[in-house]
Image: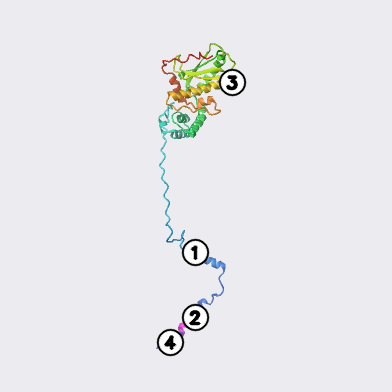
């Protein structure tokens, strides 16, 4: 049986209209949505979109990843050596070829291990067998000043000390004051050397007294214990005050040692006195114990053919 076309059209329209009316009769197509609903809709839509740092286009140059940082080679391990062997005055002499920075690192590690005597030796090698820059030298001197007073003298046996002669000449009327002061300076030098040297003193007065009332001239030099031993150069100064005589002698002795180490040994001569620096401190902390030993040893060599000065006999 055929259904008439008008009936089919009516049924199609009725089904479509009924479905639409049944699903939309509760909806409001006239009132605009609230701001809260719009905001929620925006968030939902944005979260569904793919996230990109920048919009790709045909002009932009593709970003390239930065190169990885260079890999630093591992620092060489600083060997502390055999810490069971008693330290020697010449310890770390060979290692001075590796430079000031190496010795500073070595000394620092030895201090951390509480090997203070060995650490002091390493700090001393910085200033007597390398050529440190200003900062490295200041660091080493500071460490030596910190450690030296906490340790016993290197040589505790006076009978094994190397003998030196501290010689001076002056005018006749200044000899008595100079003699007593020179004895005190000799003890200062023995302490500065950490017991490595023993100092004898000799003062020779001129044949006549100083004629004028001006400053009295004083000549100072160091030599081995014998009359014709090897000797340093002679340095002179003038003084008119017993209060400054000790410091004047100590300054002169420092300059004599500094000059002799530079001329007669391969050691780095100690840096000059800083402004206001105590000459006793300079002799204790700038002249290392090894340099004291080497200095005294060079003056105890077989005597030269040229005799030492005649004990200041020409000073008037």
What element does badge 3 sit on?
A: helix
Say whether disc 1 or disc 2 marks the residue closer to the N-terminus. Answer: 2
x and y, in percent, of residue 173 in the image: 57, 13
What element does badge 1 sit on?
A: helix
Depth check: 27 or 22 in front? 27
C-alpha distance separating marks 4 and 1:
50 Å
Query: Which residue position is annotated with label 2?
Result: 18
Residue at the spot 49% in from the left edge and 64% down from the top edge = 46
Say whether disc 2 or disc 4 marks the residue closer to the N-terminus. Answer: 4
Foreground disc of the pair 1, 2: 1
Q: Is 136 rendered above or below residue 2? A: above
Residue at the spot 47% in from the left edge and 81% down from the top edge = 15
Extent of the magenta region:
10-15
Query: Which residue position is annotated with label 3?
Result: 243
- Number of on-image labels: 4
Say whether disc 1 or disc 3 marks the residue closer to the N-terminus. Answer: 1
User: Around disc 1, counting alpha carbons within 10 Å, would you say few (fewer than 14), some (14 to 19), or many (20 or more)?
Assistant: few
Kindly identify which numbered label has been placed on residue 5. Answer: 4
C-alpha distance separating marks 4 and 3:
142 Å
Dominant SS of magenta comes to helix
Depth check: 78 or 115 in front? 78
Say whether disc 4 or disc 1 marks the residue closer to the N-terminus. Answer: 4
x and y, in percent, of residue 266 in the image: 42, 26
C-alpha distance separating marks 2 and 4:
20 Å
User: Around disc 2, counting alpha carbons within 10 Å, would you say few (fewer than 14), some (14 to 19), or many (20 or more)?
Assistant: few
Depth check: 58 or 227 in front? 58
Foreground disc of the pair 1, 3: 3
Say whether disc 2 or disc 3 marks the residue closer to the N-terminus. Answer: 2
Q: Are marks 1 and 3 in contact (CB under 8 Å)?
A: no
C-alpha distance separating marks 1 and 2:
36 Å
């Amino acid at each position: 049986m055929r259904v008439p076309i008008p009936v089919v059209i009516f049924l199609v329209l009725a089904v479509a209209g009924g479905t639409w009316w049944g699903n939309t009769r509760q909806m409001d197509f006239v009132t605009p949505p609230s701001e809260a609903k719009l905001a929620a809709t925006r968030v939902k839509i944005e979260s569904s979109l793919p996230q990109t740092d920048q919009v790709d286009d045909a002009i932009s140059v593709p970003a390239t990843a930065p190169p990885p940082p260079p890999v630093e080679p591992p620092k060489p391990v600083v060997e502390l050596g055999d810490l069971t062997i008693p330290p020697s005055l010449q310890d770390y002499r060979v290692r001075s070829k590796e430079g000031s920075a190496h010795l500073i690192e070595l000394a620092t590690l030895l201090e951390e291990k509480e090997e203070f005597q060995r650490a002091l030796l390493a700090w001393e090698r910085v200033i007597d067998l390398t050529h440190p820059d200003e900062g490295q030298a200041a660091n080493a001197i500071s460490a030596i000043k910190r450690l030296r007073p906490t340790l016993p003298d290197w040589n505790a046996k006076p009978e094994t000390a190397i003998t030196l002669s501290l010689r001076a000449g002056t005018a006749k009327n200044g000899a008595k004051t100079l003699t007593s002061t020179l004895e005190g300076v000799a003890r200062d030098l023995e302490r500065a050397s950490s017991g490595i040297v023993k100092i004898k003193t000799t003062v020779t007065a001129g044949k006549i007294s100083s004629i004028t009332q001006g400053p009295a001239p004083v000549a100072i030099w160091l030599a081995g214990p014998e009359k014709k031993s090897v000797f340093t150069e002679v340095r002179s100064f003038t003084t008119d005050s017993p209060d400054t005589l000790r410091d004047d002698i100590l300054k002169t002795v420092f300059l004599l040692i500094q000059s002799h180490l530079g001329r007669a040994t391969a050691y780095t001569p100690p840096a000059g006195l800083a402004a206001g620096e105590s000459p006793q401190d300079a002799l204790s902390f700038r002249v290392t114990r090894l340099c004291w030993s080497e200095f005294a040893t060079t003056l105890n060599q077989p005597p030269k053919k040229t005799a030492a000065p005649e004990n200041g006999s020409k000073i008037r």
